[in-house]
Amino acid sequence: MKSFEVNFDGLVGPTHNYGGLSFGNVASQSNSQQASNPKEAALQGLEKMKALMDMGFVQGVLAPQERPDVAALRSLGFSGTDAQVIERAAKDAMPLLVASCSASSMWVANAATVSPSADTADGRVHFTAANLNCKFHRSIEHPTTSRVLGAMFADQQHFAHHAALPAVAQFGDEGAANHTCFCRDYGEAGVEFFVYGRSAFDSRYPAPQKYPARQTLEASQAVARLHGLSEEGVVFGQQNPSVIDQGVFHNDVIAVGNGELLFHHQDAFLNTEAMLDELRRKLAARGAKFESISVPRDQVTVDDAVRSYLFNSQLLSRADGSMLLIVPEECRANPRVWSYLQGLTSAGGPIREVKVFDLKQSMQNGGGPACLRLRVALNETELAAVNPGVIMSAPLYDTLTGWVNKHYRDALRESDLADPQLLLECRTALDELTQILKLGSVYPFQIN
């Protein structure tokens, strides 16, 4: 049976803005308070989805969330009508209003951790929504994320959904941004690689000093248990605390993997050789030949990697067995990164081609190509069981482009977030989107 890697990209929401909310994310903080362009951001994302579809890859779309999140503001003590809640939050606690308006759900690499059916004990594809409890503006996402994923992957014969882990620091879970599936073929059992920043209960593990380590070892272990993964099919690796303190807030800012290949920076991990040996040994037992490409620090610094998002890229397998690397325009703008990539593709290794995409609106807020997509390995039967409304096609691309042009603003500043009309615009747009994507009632609001 044929199997596929399907990338479900997050559709950028109507309230895309530069709130600078993510401590530890250099781009997010450095572009704080600039005017954003939600329409351009959404169209840039859709263009990438269509381009990959046109290249022959199966491509899906994942819906954004309702913003402002009025229910979250009510839970913090703001009362009255929806308009009054927004008005009072803007007057008394603007940072909370900004957080409730965040469109960060666009980065669906953080939506959930996904295990393919070939790896799980019950032979189903497993999803665990990420609690994202390190940041308030992201911690409010997982209830809607769970409903949207449930509407996309509804067939219980093929798909299993788990609630987010307990919303406490000891179980901080950032989803697929810290998780990679390796395998010889997408339909075969492989090895799942969980990367964590710290241990919650064992002080022997080093931890960063400047920025928070968002993923804990204990959260990764819990997800592996929930998904029914065997000890032989799992490797846990620790992120280098010093690179977290340089702005590497997720593993997908310093490493990317696919198939039998891990592409990473020399300084990405602790105990690198032992970790690579474990991956190599466990994959060999599954019939796969593991390979790693380590980018030397004297060619590309950690700062280069963070600013260009070289590793926040998509590594895609092509029909001829070679791999394609999808990178943001910022990689071409960095002379050292671009020189390295030119040498990489001409060296005769597994990565034979690099394609560049303009994702400036997302990049300025701290998310590149990898952030924008959730990878789901599916066999033919499972793909047929996915809600067909979320699978990208030329007609769907045209419909979504028209939808964005109809509903999105082309400029958004912090002061605009206090406009109650923005909430109405968002709800009207999302109500229409649920019909386009055939999602049903995944949002808590009702349009009268």
Image (cartoon, rainbow, N blue to C red):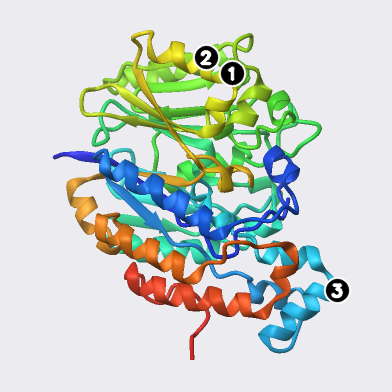
Query: What residue did someone put label 2 on?
Result: 339
- How far apart marks 2 and 3 lie (CA) works out to 50 Å
Element at label 2: helix
Q: What residue did someone put label 3 on? A: 92
Q: Position of residue 435 (x, y in %)?
A: 35, 74
Task: Confirm whether residue 205 shows in the render.
Answer: no
- Secondary structure under the numbered disc 3 in the rendered image: helix
The reply to whether dot 3 and dot 1 touch (C-beta < 8 Å) is: no
Mark 3 or mark 1: whose residue is earlier in sequence: 3
Assign the N terminus to one quadrant of the image: top left
Give the Cα distance between marks 3 and 1: 46 Å
Seen as rendered, the residue at the extreme left is: 1
* Callout 3 crowding tier (Cα within 10 Å): few <14, some 14–19, many ≥20: few
Tag 1 secondary structure: helix
Q: Amino acid at mark 1?
A: Pro
Residue 113 x/y as whole percent = 46, 46
Q: Residue at x 52, y 19 (%)?
A: 338
Q: Quadrant of residue 192?
A: top left
Q: Are circles 2 and 1 on residues that touch, CB within 8 Å?
A: yes
Q: Amino acid at mark 2?
A: Ser
Relative to 311, 286 lies left or right:
left
Q: Quadrant of residue 116?
A: top left
User: Is residue 184 depicted above or below 339 in this figure?
Assistant: below
* Residue at image mark 1: 335
Q: Using a 10 Å C-alpha cutoff, classify the residue at mark 1 as few (fewer than 14 neighbours), some (14 to 19) or many (20 or more).
A: few
**Residue sitting nearer the eye, 313 or 254:** 313
